[in-house]
Image (spheres, rainbow, N blue to C red):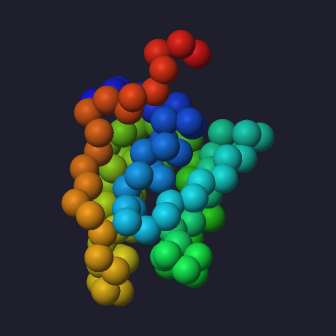
Amino acid sequence: MPTHLDLEEAMAISEMAFLPCRGITDADVSDASYALRVEDETGAALLTIAHIARSQYSDPVHLAGLLEQARLELSKDGIHLTPWSMPTQSGASPSR
């Protein structure tokens, strides 16, 4: 698992954590944060996290906990998600 995530990596991971639902991220480059919205197949919002700060996503363990908590909330609401775990490698390009 990487020791530090950048904004693009964190957004990509967040989008994949809620399949088969659609995870949509929106970056705020002014403070390197992002918002996350999870929608069902009709486009209805199931979950919104308005602000995920760099301090919340840069540590992969912290981001994994945040995403697992959000998945748990959806599960309690009866939303069935595919199994997910934090990727060992984000798959992002090593060039920056």
Q: How many marks?
A: 0
Q: Could you tell me if residue 45 is visible in this image? A: no
x and y percentages locating residue 61 in the rendered image: 31, 43
Which of the pair 50/25 is nearer the observer? 25
95, above or below 16, in the image: above
78, above or below 82, in the image: below
Which of the pair 68/59 is nearer the observer? 68
51, above or below 60, in the image: below
Q: Residue at x 26, y 55 (%)?
A: 84
The quadrant of the image that shows the N terminus is top left
Please state if 11 lies on the left or on the right of 2 as rendered: right
Please state if 69 lies on the left or on the right of 50 as rendered: left
x and y percentages locating residue 34 in the rendered image: 62, 50
Q: Residue at x 49, y 75 (%)?
A: 41
Q: Residue at x 77, y 40 (%)?
A: 30
Q: Could you tell me if residue 93 is visible in this image? A: yes
Q: Residue furthest front?
A: 41
Q: Residue furthest top?
A: 95
The quadrant of the image that shows the C terminus is top right
Which of the pair 66/15 is nearer the observer? 15
Asked where in the image residue 78 lies, by quadrant, the reply is: bottom left
Asked where in the image residue 59 lies, by quadrant, the reply is: top left
x and y percentages locating residue 87 in the rendered image: 29, 39
Q: Residue furthest right?
A: 30
Which of the pair 14/44 is nearer the observer? 44
Q: Residue at x 36, y 39 (%)?
A: 60
